[in-house]
Structure formats: C-alpha cells, structure tokens
Image (tube, rainbow, N blue to C red):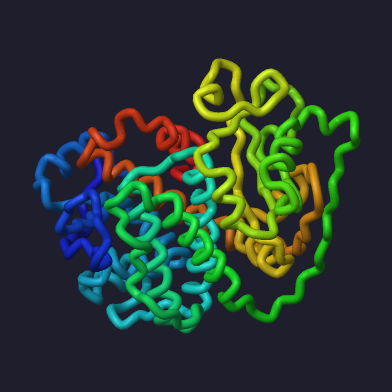
C-alpha cells in the first residue's frame, strides 16, 4: 500500500475555441510515496466525480519530471508548500527550470508528438479526441517555446486549424499541423555542439529490393515527389517474417502536403509480396506499412534525428532502401539525456492514457492501437 504525500486540484486548461471531446473541468494530481497498488488506484478513483480527472503519480516519477519534463513538474507541484518542495525535490516555490532543460523537453516532445500525424492521415487513425489533442499540443508547445524564447512568434494564436468538429476537415487539418511541427523543429536552438555527419545511402541490392515491394508502391504513388525510404524497427533487423508484424518507414519527399493528398486513407499493408490498400490491408497475414514523412532538406533531417530518443540506434539498426539520409554522430552523454527525456515523456503519455481510460473506459474499448502502444512502451514504467 502506498501513501499519499500530496494532492491538489486545479482547472483543466483548454485552448479557447477547440472542440474538446472530454469535458473534465478539473485535474487532480496525486503524489504517492511509492508505486500505487491496484487497490490504491481503485480507492482513489472511487472518490472522484465526473468533472475531475484524477492523475496518480509516484514520487520517483515526479522527481524525474523535475529534470526531464520540468513544465509538467511545475504544473503538478505549483501549489505545494515550499518546505515540502525542498524536502521531496530539493527546490523551493520560486524555482524556475533552467532554459536548457526546457529546450530539451521541447525538442523531444515536438519530435515525438509530431511523429504520429502521418499514420493518422495515411491509415485513417483519427477521432475527434486525437485530432483535438494534436492541436492542443501544438498550442501548448508554442506557449512554452515563446515563454522561454525557443520558438519564433507566429500569427494566429490560438491555432484552431479550422472547424475540427467537422470530421471532413481532419485530413487537411492534420496536414497543416504536421507542417507546424516541422516549423517548430526548424526554429529551435541547437547549442554550440558541432556534429560529424555520416550520410547513409541505399544498402540493398537489386535482388534484395524485391523483399520490400512497398518501394515500388511509393514510386508509383508519389512519383517524382519520392526521394528516399529508411526502414526501421524489427523488419530492419531480421528477414524472418515471423519476427515482425509491420514495415515502418521514414519516407523523404519534396512536398509533404502533396504526399498527404496522395496517401491519405490508403491504409497500405504488404500481403503475399505486394502492397494492398483499404480493407485488404486487414487480411490475415498482412503486414502493416508505416509511413512517417520527412521534408527534403538535410537541415530538418539533421535536427529531427538529433531530437530522437536514440540516434545511434537509428544510425546502426536501420536500412536505407532508397535515396540517402544524413545522420549526425552525437556524443553518448547527449544520447542518454535525450533517451531519459523521451522515457519520461512516454511514461507521462501512457499514464495519461490510462488515467483517461479509468475515467472513461468506453473511449478505450475497441482501440487496439492504443493497447499496442502501451504494450510496446511498457518498459518505460520500469
């Protein structure tokens, strides 16, 4: 049994004008001295009302947030007495996070949150909740970036991306959001470190490329817009089809929004040595075809790869199937810091999804992609 060290309640901030699906008026963070048991969580949730989203956290997680997600740490502890802050976290009520720690959070969160937009567009993985959440995230990151001077001022805040209550606008809205995430990555400061660049070119021969029929599919769909493809994940590490369930790709193009228009709703998968679309992609034995679009310029690729959870893993354990990709060589201490930031971010994301699921289980039932995400990333709870 874990003991509650601190709890508070505050307004659930929402961007004016966005049509939020969930109607929680309040958020109640609760800090336990240890990982709460199932009974601890059940007992806690049984005291909540329908207007309040309860977020249970362990003390150790909040300590990690202090260093790697400092804006989340401030939000959870902003009403905590100064003596308690000093005792538990070694800071007082006037503590302001270092600008570099905010920048690390901003870089990692922008990379991670923008990475799923293409899948939503290509595979029609979207709902009002997910679309509004992406818009909310862009507004939140913008305000953090502006407050600390890490992002340029841009007109139109708050960013509403049209009438998101109309689902016919979602594809275009998500495409516009993708470009804004790209802008954020291009604008953020990088610091003074100078990196060696290793440009990797296609490393598959003519005989082997037939094992990846989606390259021809990309060429047919995208035409001259197609610049390159990098395969990552399990399929890049083995040729045994029993050991992977999908082909995940970075796809480099001249024009991201033009690629969105061509690929939207195609729902591609590989089945019997060819790419199938639509309902056929759900057939037994079909392997999902993942698409993460990248703009053509080397500077963006360089920055995006820097902001990854582990650029060394992507440099050493991926395959270039077409074109070329520049990889910065980062010092190991930087890779570790970014990895820790991403780990805390994923922990927060997964825990947030589960907290939401506790309060509105009907929204989670029938969402296999969410369960797959949680299962794949459960290591971040360790």
Q: Position of residue 54 (x, y in %)?
A: 20, 50
Position of residue 170 in the picture relative to residue 231 (left or right): left
Residue plotted at (29% across, 67% down):
75
* Number of marks in picture: 0
Q: Position of residue 206 (x, y in %)?
A: 90, 34
Q: Nearer the viewer, residue 296 or 188?
A: 296
Q: Is residue 236 visible?
A: no
In this picture, is 269 found above or below 114?
above
Residue plotted at (21% across, 61% down):
12
Position of residue 380 in the picture relative to residue 251 (left or right): left
Residue 77, picture quadrant: bottom left
In this picture, is 55 found above or below 268?
below
Q: Nearer the viewer, residue 370 or 165?
A: 165
User: The N terminus lies in which quarter of the figure?
Assistant: top left
Q: Nearer the viewer, residue 84 or 186?
A: 186
Q: Position of residue 38 (x, y in %)?
A: 26, 34
Q: Is residue 348 visible?
A: yes
Residue 326, picture quadrant: bottom right
- Residue at the top extreme of this rendering: 284
Position of residue 280 in the picture relative to residue 297 (left or right): left
In this picture, is 196 found above or below 254?
below
Q: Position of residue 263 (x, y in %)?
A: 57, 43
Position of residue 240 in the picture relative to residue 58 (left or right): right
Q: Nearer the viewer, residue 371 or 117?
A: 117
Residue plotted at (37% across, 32% down):
367
In this picture, is 181 found above or below 97?
above
Residue plotted at (49% across, 78% down):
151
């Amino acid at each position: 049994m874990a003991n509650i060290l601190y709890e508070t309640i505050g307004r659930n901030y929402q961007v004016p004008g966005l049509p939020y699906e969930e109607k929680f008026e309040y958020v109640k963070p609760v800090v336990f001295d240890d990982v709460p048991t199932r009974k601890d969580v059940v007992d806690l949730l049984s005291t909540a009302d329908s207007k309040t989203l309860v977020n249970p956290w362990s003390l150790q997680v909040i300590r990690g947030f202090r260093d790697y997600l400092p804006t989340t740490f401030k939000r959870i502890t902003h009403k905590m007495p100064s003596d308690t802050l000093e005792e538990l976290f070694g800071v007082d009520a006037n503590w302001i996070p270092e600008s570099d720690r905010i920048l690390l959070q901003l870089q990692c969160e922008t990379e991670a949150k923008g990475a799923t937009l293409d899948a939503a567009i290509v595979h029609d993985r979207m709902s009002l909740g997910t679309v509004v959440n992406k818009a909310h995230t862009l507004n939140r990151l913008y305000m953090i970036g502006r407050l600390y001077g890490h992002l340029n001022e841009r007109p139109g805040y708050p960013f509403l991306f049209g009438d998101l209550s109309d689902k016919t606008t979602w594809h275009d809205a998500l495409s516009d959001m993708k470009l804004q995430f790209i802008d954020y990555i291009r604008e953020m400061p990088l610091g003074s470190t100078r990196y060696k660049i290793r440009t990797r070119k296609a490393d598959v021969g003519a005989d082997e490329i037939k094992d990846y029929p989606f390259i021809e599919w990309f060429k047919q769909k995208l035409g001259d817009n197609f610049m390159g493809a990098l395969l990552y994940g399990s399929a890049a590490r083995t040729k045994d089809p029993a050991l992977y369930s999908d082909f995940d790709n970075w796809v480099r193009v001249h024009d991201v929004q033009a690629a969105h228009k061509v690929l939207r709703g195609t729902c591609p998968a590989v089945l019997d040595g060819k790419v199938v679309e639509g309902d056929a992609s759900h057939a037994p034995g079909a392997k999902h075809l993942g698409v993460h679009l990248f703009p053509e310029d080397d500077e963006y690729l360089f920055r995006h790869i820097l902001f990854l959870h582990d650029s060394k893993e992507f440099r050493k354990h991926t395959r270039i199937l077409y074109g070329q990709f520049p990889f910065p060589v980062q010092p190991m201490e930087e890779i570790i810091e970014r990895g820790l930031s991403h780990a805390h971010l994923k922990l927060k994301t997964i825990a947030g999804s589960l907290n939401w699921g506790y309060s509105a289980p009907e929204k989670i039932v029938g969402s296999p992609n969410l369960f797959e995400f949680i299962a794949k990333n459960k290591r971040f709870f360790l």
